[in-house]
Image: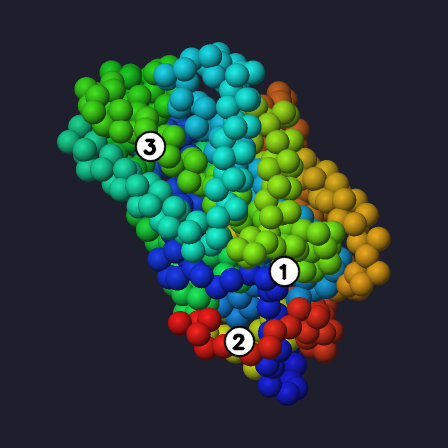
Amino acid sequence: MATETGPVTTVRPADVGLKRELGLVGATWASETSIIGSGWLFAPLTAAILIGGAAILDWVIAGVVVIVLALCHAELGAMYPVSGGTARFPHFAFGGAAGVGFGFFAYMQAVTIAPIECFAFIQYASYYWPNLYDSKTQNVTGAGFWVTIALMAFFTAVNFLAMRLFARVNNVITWWKVAIPIIAIIVLLFKFHGGNFTAGGSFMPGGVRGLFPALPAAGLIFAYSGFEQADQLAGEIKNPGRNLPLAIIISVLIGTVIYTLLQFVMIGAMPTDLLTKGWTGFSDDAITAGPFAGLAAVVGLGFLATILRIDAFVSPSGTGLIYTTGTSRISYGLARNRYAPQIFGRVDRNGVPWIGLIGAFLIGLLFLLPFPSWHSLVSLITAASVLMYAGAPLSLGAFRGQVPDANRPYRMPAASVLAPAAFVVADLLIYWSGFEVIWKLGIVLVIGYVVLGTSMAFDRQRPPLDWKSALWLPAWLIGLGIISWQGQYGGGAKLPPVNTGHIGFWYDMAVVAAFSLAIYYWAMYSKLPRDKMLALVAVQKSEPEPASNFE
């Protein structure tokens, strides 16, 4: 990981046609509205059922994990403030072969969030319109599908507004989305039962072993997803060197506090007569269908239940709205990398990548068919998110070696320790998702290489693939798959489980950590040389921008 010397780096990538109209509040709320989405409506109850009172520990653990990953994104986004950053940083650091994989996962993670949020909307809406959702199969109905399509069309239409107007709409929605959980926390504290944390006789019924798989399975990591939205919109943020890292860090800290307190009051306010069999034996259809609203109604807080049911329409809609924005910026970034057809790089007079918006709508519709409920999508997308997030510490470590002299408005502290640690944590999250999820992600990745590879085959200006700098990528994914197969977590409902369990508990995590560090340092050793890396950046370079753009 020795640094490479050379002339001071001044070349920076830039975006064409986008307008810097997003300030600090707009950038922060872009990430915050993604974090406070459908996750808070469902994940606290699921986590409590899986691991009892210890669920509150998991939210703190997840918050720490996400903060470390967020710090990586903060440095990268401030250093290279380009839209669709999560799809572009690995491209600069490792070349086309590695960049295609991370770019495709970034797109898949983003394009599937809007359908997930729509499903959450439908599940809560079924309280008023029961024909939208089948509580027995936990799937949306035919009518629910049509409403979901209409919602996604609405998200797309609003995104055609100029960024300064879109930001105003999003700011209003996000203030509401942050206020309602806080109100719920304050009101439900008056219904607190401390004994609920040890209902059934144990604070941690699944033991320490149960804490880890709950992070992805209960949707905790999914709930925190979205902090990277400021990176995705970096090409439209004013003064990105200051505003972008602040937006990412502030949004994660706010989300961590809100989620931890929501879990606290969810456990504490549950009527004790519903926990006679402990959290693992919890069963109440009214609460399960809409956890916080149902809980408020059961404990006699009808006014709060009504507010929460209204918020169940607003909160997922706001997240679906901003993820539609982010998806179009990622496809814009893929076009700038020349992975996707150049038509996705087209913007209208408002600076909106309109082809990317239409693509986000049409491709998002595909995920309405095979995954007809919130819970069936969340594990797969959580793992895809973590694979995308793993690209940040890898890129950060590579850039520290390739361009140590580059301007970094924000520098992650102790990067030589935290970057590899972040990569290890990302791999552990993938491992805890289970083999059932990991092998499906392998299929998704193959599809991605076929789709983007076909597009690149017809582009005469496509970037070099640089396979030598990406040999660690297939070794990483295959190795994780093998460890997962031999490890403790299946991640599916199949009986018997698809994993063998040959690697014992605790030993499995040590194996994942050691394997991850080996891959990380292999990637650092084989990263692109400085001149090749700067050549990729220069293709997307910018001229010095007028100071007025950063006011």
Residue shown at 19%/37% (left/top)?
186
Image coords of residue 512 (percent x, y): 60, 50
Residue 88's tag is 1
Residue 545's tag is 2
Residue type, label 3: Asp
Q: Tags 2 and 1 in contact by the CB under 8 Å rule?
A: no
Q: Quadrant of residue 333?
A: bottom right
Residue 213's tag is none
Image position of 170 (left or right of 117): left
Residue type, label 2: Glu
Residue shown at 64%/25% (left/top)?
370
- Residue 196 in the image: above or below residue 166: above
| Residue 124 visible in this rendered orientation of the protein | yes
Residue shown at 56%/53% (left/top)?
352
Kindly report which numbered mark, 2 or 3, lies closer to the viewer in this rendering.
2
What residue is disc 3 on?
Answer: 311
**Under tag 1, what secondary structure?**
loop
Q: Quadrant of residue 200?
A: top left
Q: How many marks?
A: 3
Kindly report which numbered mark, 1 or 3, lies closer to the viewer in this rendering.
3
**Under tag 2, what secondary structure?**
loop
Q: Residue furthest bottom?
A: 7
Frontmost residue, 376 versus 368: 368
Residue type, label 1: Arg
